[in-house]
Image (cartoon, grey):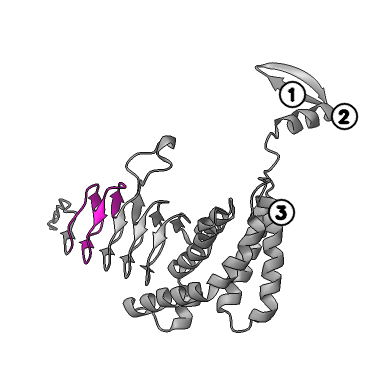
Amino acid sequence: MDFIVTFEGKKKSMKHAEIVNLIESRKNNPCLKFRLKRQTERFTDLLFLTLFDQETPVAENLPRLQAYFRELVELACWKPNASCGEVWERYVQRLPELLDKLNLDAKAISDCDPASLSMEEVYMAYPGFYAICIYRLAHELYREGFPLVPRLMTEYAHRQTGVDINPGAQIGKSFFIDHATGVVIGETAVIHDNVKVYQGVTLGALYVAKQLKQTKRHPTIEDNVTIYANATILGGDTVVGANSVIGGNAWLTHSVPPNSKVFHSPEIKIKTQHVG
C-alpha cells in the first residue's frame, strides 16, 4: 500500500514499509516503555489498599506487591550496575513507620477540618490525604535512588487530585492539605511538622534553569505554619518561620521570622447603583 506524504509542500509517495522504518528510526530511546507507567499505577493502587483497606489482606498482598516491584525493577532499572533488586526489603520494612505517619496526616485533616464527619471519610474522600499518601510512599523510593517510579507515582496522584508534590520534597509529620486542587510543592521544598496548606498554594523556585538541579530551589516552611489559598512562596533561601500565617494570594520571595502574619491587600472598590 502506498501513502501520499507531504514534505515542505512537495508530495511524495511512500510504501508502508518505508513509513514503518522511518518511524522506528526516530524512536531513539530504547528504555522508554510506557508499560512501566501502567505497572506503576497498578503497584500504587495495590499498595494503597494493602495499607488501608480492611478487606485487603496484608499477608497475601505483600508477596503480590513484591512481584509487582520486580516488574518495575526490570522496566525501570536499565543501568547495569543499579542495585534496584535490593530496594524492596528495605522499603517493606519502612511501611509500618510510613503508615504511622499517614495516620497522623489523616488525624490532622480530621482535627482541622470542621466539615470532616469521620476518619473513614478522610481516608476515602479527601484528595489532599491521597496526594500526601502517595507522596510519602514515593519519597522512600526516591531516597533509595530508584529511577523514574517515584515520579510516576506522584504524577498518578497529581492526575487524580490536582496536587503536584515532587517525591524529592521533605515533609514532616501531621501535614494537612485542604481542598487540594492546584497545590504545587517543588523537589527541594522542606516542610516541617503540623503545617496546613490550602488550595492553590505554590512552593516553587525563583528561577528555572537546568544548572540549578543540585541546589535548593524551593522554600522551607517551619513548624505550625498555615498557608492560605493561592499563596505563592518562592526561592530556596526563603524560610517561613514557625507559627506564621501566610494569607491568601500573598506573593513571598524572602524569609519571614517566626510568628509573622503576611497578607495580600488588594484594592477593592464597590460601586452601588441607584435605582429609580
Q: Quadrant of residue 243?
A: bottom left
C-alpha distance separating marks 1 and 3: 38 Å
Q: Which mark is residue 1?
A: 2
Q: Which mark is residue 5?
A: 1
Q: Is residue 114 visible?
A: no
274 displayed left or right of 219: left
Q: Residue at x 46, y 79 (%)?
A: 121
Number of the front mark, 2 or 3: 3
Query: Which badge, 2 or 3, comes first in the chain's sequence?
Result: 2
Say which element carries label 2: loop
- Residue carrying label 3: 74
Q: Residue at x 71, y 58 (%)?
A: 71
Magenta range: 230-258
Quadrant in which the N terminus appears:
top right
Q: Check if mark 2's residue and mark 3's residue have beta carbons within 8 Å.
A: no
C-alpha distance separating marks 2 and 3: 38 Å
